[in-house]
Image (cartoon, rainbow, N blue to C red):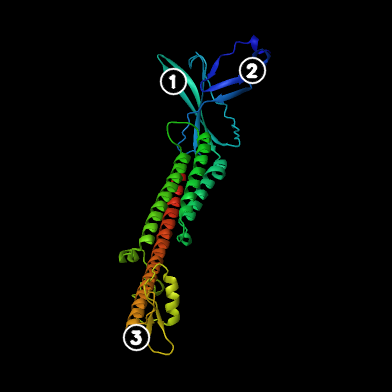
Amino acid sequence: MPLRYYCLKRRVIFSLETVPVIPAEQEILQVESNGIVSVSKPVIVSNYCPMQIKNFPFDEQECPLIISPWGYTARQVTVYDSGSAIEMRGNSEWNADCARFNENIVQVKLNLYKELQYGLHFKRNPTYYVWVLILPTYLITCLSIVGIFMPNSSSGERIEKVTLGLATLLTMAVILNIVSEAMPKGADLPMLGYFVMAEIVLCIISLIVAIVIIQVHHRVSTRTHPPPEWLFTILLLTKTEQWAVKPPDNRSLSGSQIASNVIVLGKRTVSKQKSLRREPSVNTWTTSLPSDTEKTTAVPPHCASDDMRQMVTELRAYLAKLNQDEAIVGQWIRIFDRIDAVFLTTLQITNFVVSVFLLT
C-alpha cells in the first residue's frame, strides 16, 4: 500500500543529511499477515564527522551515527538493531574498516528516549600523499645536502653550492603550496605539515652552513693562515708529506733554474744604472756608464759574485714562500673536505631520523 495511507512514526538520524532517492508519495509499504509493517527508504546520506587531522595523511577517523525516534519516548516507540551484517565499502581515499554498535537510553527531564549509536571507522589511504609529496620532498632534501656538502667540490668556486641551496628552497616553497591545498584545515598542524617544515629547516641550515664555510675558506685561502693543530686532532687528520710546510732549502740552484726562476719572479725588477758584461780576453768585469765618452772601469769578480748570490737567495726565499703557501692551501683543502663530509653525514642522518620520527 502507498506510504501516504499509513501514519509512520517519525525517526531522526541526528548526524546525517539525507536526500531521498524515491519521493515520499511513491514509497510503498509492505504489510504482512502477522501485522508487521515494513518500509524501505533508499536515501543518499552525508554524515558530518569530527575529524582528527593530527596524523594526516596516516589518520583514522571515527564517525558516529545516531538514530532515534523524534518526539516519542521509549515506552511509545522502541528502536533496535536487526542484527544483519553491515556491508561497508570505501573509496580511493578511505578504507572502511568496521562498524561499532551500541544502544543507549537517554533521559531528558522526566522522559526516557532510546538511541541507536553506530561508530563507523575509516582509515585514510596515504598512497597518493606518500608518492606525490612525502617521497619527493625527502629525496629533494637528500640531494640538496649531497650537492652542498660534496667533498670533491671544495676547491675553486663554491658559489654553486649556494645556488643549489636557493633552488632547493624554491622547490620546497612549491611543495609547501601543494601541501597546503591538500591538507584539511584545522586548529592543529598535521603530521605532513611538520614534515615539510622540518625539511625546509634542514635546507636552510645546510645553506647557512655552506655560506659560513665559503666565507671561512675564502679568508684562509687568501691570507694563507696555517691551520691550527687542534683542527687536525678534532677532524682525525694527519699532516701528510705532500702538504707539509717545509722550510726554505739552502742548497744552491743551477744556472737554468736561476733563469727560470727569474722569469717566474716577474714582480720584482732589478733595475740598475750599470749593466755588467764580461770581456772575452780579460778576466774582468766592465760596466757602461751613461756619458759622452765611453769609460771602462774594472769591477772585482767577488762583487759580481755577491750580487748573484743575493739574487739567488731572494729567489730561493720567494720560491720557498710560494711552496709554503701552496702547502697551507692544500692543508685547508683537506680540512674543508673533512668538514664537508662531517656535515654531509650529520645532516643526512638527521634528515632520516626526523623523517622517521614524524611519519611514524
Where residue 239 appears, x then y in whole percent?
Answer: 37, 71
Tell me which label, 1 or 2, sits earlier in the chain.
2
Q: Earlier in the sequence, mark 3 or mark 1?
A: 1
Is mark 3 in CB contact (under 8 Å) with mark 1?
A: no
Q: Secondary structure at mark 1?
A: strand
Task: Tell me if 6 is positioned left or right of 59 in this view.
Answer: right
Per the rendering, the mark at residue 34 is 2
- Which residue is located at x 37 percent, y 78 percent? 312
Residue kind at label 1, given as amino acid type: Val
Q: Which class describes the residues within 10 Å of circle 2: few (<14), some (14-19), or many (20+)?
A: few
Which is more N-terminal, label 3 or label 2? 2
- At x 37% / y 84%, what residue is drawn? 285
Q: Nearer the viewer, residue 164 or 217?
A: 217
For the N terminus, give its image quadrant: top right
Residue 118 x, y percent position in the rendering: 51, 28
Horizontal relation, residue 58 to residue 23: left or right: left
| Amino acid type indicated by mark 2 | Asn
Residue 301: which disc?
3
Alpha carbon distance from label 1 to label 2: 31 Å
Question: Which label number is shown at residue 106?
Answer: 1
Q: Position of residue 154 (x, y in %)?
A: 45, 60
The answer to whether 226 is drawn above or below residue 77 in the figure is: below
Q: Secondary structure at mark 3?
A: helix
Between 303 and 277, the one lying in front of the other is 277
Q: Nearer the viewer, mark 1 or mark 2?
A: 1
Q: Percent position (x, y) of residue 215?
A: 38, 54
Query: Residues under labels 3 and 1: Cα distance?
Result: 125 Å
Residue 231, quarter of the rendered image: bottom left
Q: Nearer the viewer, mark 2 or mark 3?
A: 3
Q: Amino acid at mark 3?
A: Pro
